[in-house]
Image (spheres, rainbow, N blue to C red):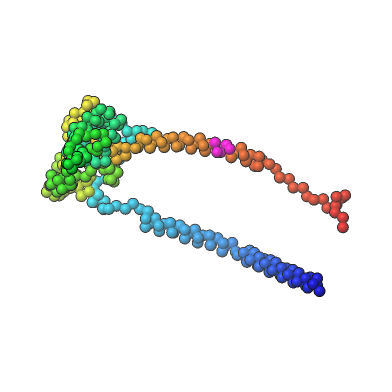
Amino acid sequence: MLSRSYLRSMRSVGAARNAAVNTSKRAASSSSSTANAASPFALNLAGTTATAVAVGTMAWYYHLYGPELHAMTLAEEGLHATKYPWVHEKYLKTFDHQALRRGFQVYQEVCASCHSLSRIPYRSLVGVTHTVDEAKAMAEENEYDSEPNDEGEIEKRPGKLSDYLPSPYKNDEAARAANNGALPPDLSLMVKARHGGCNYIFSLLTGYPEEPPAGATVQEGLNFNPYFPGTGIAMARVLYNELVEYEDGTPASTSQMAKDVVEFLNWAAEPEMDQRKKMGMKVLAITSALFALSVWVKRYKWSAIKTRKIQYTAPQMGGRNAPKH
């Protein structure tokens, strides 16, 4: 009795399994027939529609977020600065350190009376524009607050290499009071903070006309400069021919002084540029060698697989090796 009941249960399980297999086969055949029934026109239409939707989505996204935004209109931004061939902007060129030294001299003798370089310490000048002894001598010419003594009084001490270049004013209020309410901006990041960078600052410094053009209105206390937004700037022209006597004997024309100080301000905003370019060249050289090596290893490892031949030998239906029934 137990054997008969066991056989009946096994037969029922086998029948259920066969029924499930047959059902799945019918479903697969029906789906394949449905897929085969789809016309090529319908498939092309679906692909074209999907492509159009994707392209339209990208176009709409670019319309919303792609174009460059400006805080002011073109009329308010002023005259567009001319693009000049700065040597330090080339991939394989570095800063001209003689120009940086001359630019620092222009900043000290002309710009430092109003503008600060609060992010530049004296130690950053070592090996770039000055030697260690020269930087120490310049730092010691200024006085800085020392640590409070036992009585809580703060005394003055000579500057050190770790000190930052001093500001010409004690605070912003004093700066505004000395400049008719205008606050001279800090020049540490000025090249990065202005649209056009070096080209804008150079054009601004050399763009003061002798007289405002006919029809131009300038508010009282402002100076006309077509490159400044609104054309009215509080800073008057500061660079004139032979205003500075360069140590190396370079003729100190207006354009030469503007070029030198702009290059120095570009270094101040990006002092790591030379190191970054050097590191970039090393990365390109190493990655190129590793890429060539990886291509060789790939070809070496896959050569045996890609060059092999696969031969199919059909089974023999007759003969001595044919299976016997």
The residue depicted at 73 percent of the width and 45 percent of the height is 311
Q: Quadrant of residue 167?
A: top left
Q: Among all residues in the image, which is located at the extreme left?
A: 220
Q: Position of residue 289 (x, y in %)?
A: 51, 35
Q: Quadrant of residue 32?
A: bottom right
**Nearest the camera: 114 or 15?**
15
Q: Among all residues in the image, which is located at the extreme front?
A: 150
Instruction: Indicate whether 60 appears above or below 16.
Output: above
Does 295 appear in magenta? yes
Q: Relative to 5, is 140 on the left or the right?
A: left
**Residue 256, visible in the rendered structure:** no
Stretch in magenta: 293-297
**Nearest the camera: 24 or 9?**
9
Q: Quadrant of the N terminus?
A: bottom right
Q: Among all residues in the image, which is located at the extreme top?
A: 249
**Residue 57, visible in the rendered structure:** yes
The residue depicted at 56 percent of the width and 64 percent of the height is 42
Magenta span main SS: helix
The residue depicted at 87 percent of the width and 57 percent of the height is 325
Q: Relative to 320, is 71 on the left or the right?
A: left
Q: Position of residue 87 (x, y in %)?
A: 33, 34
Does 4 appear in magenta? no
Q: Position of residue 154 (x, y in %)?
A: 18, 40
